[in-house]
């Protein structure tokens, strides 16, 4: 039972109106409080909650958790415990912080050990990511990029409507929100040039994506079916897959993305569980042609999550430059995971699978500068009058995401990063 999702529940912790983190969210993350200890925690409103302190003080007794499961610097061990445990922990946290529960509400001393100002703690990478896969599952994005890279006739490759296309990315350069990113250098082929040149990328871009984090899968050689796939998904984060379009364009054939992609990807720090997103479940786009049987799913497996992108020049204010939605994804997470493992490929706790750029049907909902500026031909206007075709040094890109329905809002906070000049 998802008692943690009870929309009528209120917390005794002060919870600002319109917060991304009402008591119905209960995400998981890793933070360092002022005393330099790293701990796994959750968040309600603007309060970060130390789960290892909560456990040590006895508030999680009866849940049969390993003693040190929250005294870790990643969520991997907790994720390994599986969905019934994640559920039991979220339910217990909801119960404990319910406005009517006195256990911790009336114990100031314990509160001092457990509760921190969410703005004062330093968020760290929530998981140790063993493997990272990036899909390409938004039809609008695939068509837009296809038109720009290959022309209208060859926009969508013949395989695209039959399987979730993806590539194996690199996990070493996935970083937490707030870390700056240096403009990458590399090899590019300028238009009409005879030979390639080397230097800082001139077409630096973001990609608006979300990523899901898995638990341990099955043995090598076995597959996860589309119907059982969500049992293996712990939760989701916002994902900015930084991309150097000029490097990408010159290198991507025949083996796909490489140095144009692997210099950095930024994620939001709080992992919102799939359970918390249940109220926002929706049907994805109609799939035509009908996918092969192993990709057919009787359960609606899209999620209605609003996604916004903001750009702020050095010292300037945020301008909203895109509003998209996770529900536009043609291939669902369940289909992605089923496809990923259909050949017997195994997965582990902490693996990260990104959606691919999420573009919607309208120009305002495109999920990259490449599409928003249509390959640099239509500059994007910012609030202060400046224009952008791609990302410039000193620019800060922020992505926010949230589901909202019947007065309930479940959000992801933000993923933010500033671009510094090339080293
Ligand atoms: Mn990507």
Image (cartoon, rainbow, N blue to C red):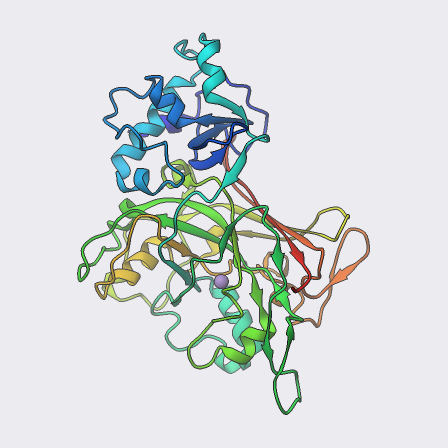
Task: Name the residue located 26 percent from the left edge and 29 percent from the top edge.
Answer: 65
Q: Quadrant of residue 297?
A: bottom left
Residue, x 62% and y 60% (percent of image)?
182
Q: Position of residue 326 (x, y in %)?
A: 48, 51
Q: Nearer the viewer, residue 292 or 171?
A: 171
Q: Please identify the quarter of the rendering in which residue 69 is found.
A: top left
- Pinpoint residue 31: horizontal percent, then vertical percent: 48, 35
Instruction: Name the side, left or right, on which 322 lies relative to 10.
Output: right
Is residue 319 among what the camera can see? yes
User: From what the image shows, is residue 236 above or below residue 288?
Assistant: above
Q: In this picture, is 118 found above or below 274?
A: above
Mark yes or no: residue 25 visible.
no
Viewed as shown, does residue 272 lie left or right of 223?
A: right
Horizontal and vertical percent position of residue 354? 43, 56
Image quadrant occupied by the N terminus:
top left
Whole-percent x, y for residue 408 in the image: 49, 31
Residue 380 or 197: which is nearer the viewer?
197
Q: Quarter holding the C terminus? A: bottom right
Give me the residue at 29% from left, 52% from top: 348
């Amino acid at each position: 039972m998802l008692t943690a999702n009870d929309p009528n529940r209120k917390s005794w912790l002060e919870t600002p109106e319109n917060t991304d983190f009402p008591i119905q969210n209960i995400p998981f993350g890793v933070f360092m409080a002022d005393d330099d200890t790293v701990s796994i925690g959750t968040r309600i409103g603007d309060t970060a909650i130390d789960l290892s302190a909560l456990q040590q003080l006895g508030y999680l007794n009866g849940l049969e958790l390993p003693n040190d499961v929250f005294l870790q610097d990643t969520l991997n061990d907790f994720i390994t415990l599986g969905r019934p445990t994640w559920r039991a922990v979220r339910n217990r946290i909801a119960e404990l912080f319910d406005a009517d529960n006195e256990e911790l509400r009336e114990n100031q001393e314990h509160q001092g050990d457990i509760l921190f100002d969410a703005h004062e703690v330093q968020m760290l990478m929530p998981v140790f990511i063993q493997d990272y896969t990036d899909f390409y599952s938004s039809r609008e994005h695939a068509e837009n990029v296809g038109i720009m890279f290959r022309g209208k006739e060859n926009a969508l490759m013949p395989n695209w409507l039959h399987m979730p296309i993806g590539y194996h990315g690199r996990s070493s350069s996935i970083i937490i929100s707030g870390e700056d990113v240096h403009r990458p250098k590399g090899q590019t082929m300028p238009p009409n040039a005879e030979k390639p040149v080397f230097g800082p990328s001139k077409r630096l871009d973001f990609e608006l994506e979300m990523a899901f984090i898995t638990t341990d899968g099955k043995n090598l050689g076995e597959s996860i079916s589309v119907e059982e796939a969500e049992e293996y998904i712990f939760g989701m984060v916002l994902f900015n897959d930084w991309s150097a379009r000029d490097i990408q364009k010159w290198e991507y054939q025949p083996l796909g993305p490489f140095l144009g992609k692997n210099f950095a990807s930024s994620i939001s720090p709080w992992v919102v569980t799939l359970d918390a997103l249940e109220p926002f479940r929706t049907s994805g786009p109609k799939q035509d042609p009908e996918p092969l049987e192993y990709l057919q799913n009787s359960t609606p497996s899209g999620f209605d999550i609003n996604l916004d992108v903001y750009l702020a020049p050095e010292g300037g204010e945020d301008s909203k430059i895109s509003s998209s939605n996770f529900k536009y994804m043609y291939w669902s997470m369940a289909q992605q995971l089923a496809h990923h493992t259909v050949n017997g490929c195994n997965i582990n706790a902490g693996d990260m699978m990104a959606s691919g750029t999420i573009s919607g049907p309208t120009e305002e909902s495109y999920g990259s500068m490449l599409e928003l500026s249509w390959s640099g031909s239509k500059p994007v206007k910012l609030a202060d009058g400046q224009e952008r075709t791609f990302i410039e040094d000193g620019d800060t890109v922020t992505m926010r995401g949230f589901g909202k329905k019947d007065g309930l809002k479940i959000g992801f906070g933000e993923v933010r990063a500033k671009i510094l000049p090339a080293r």
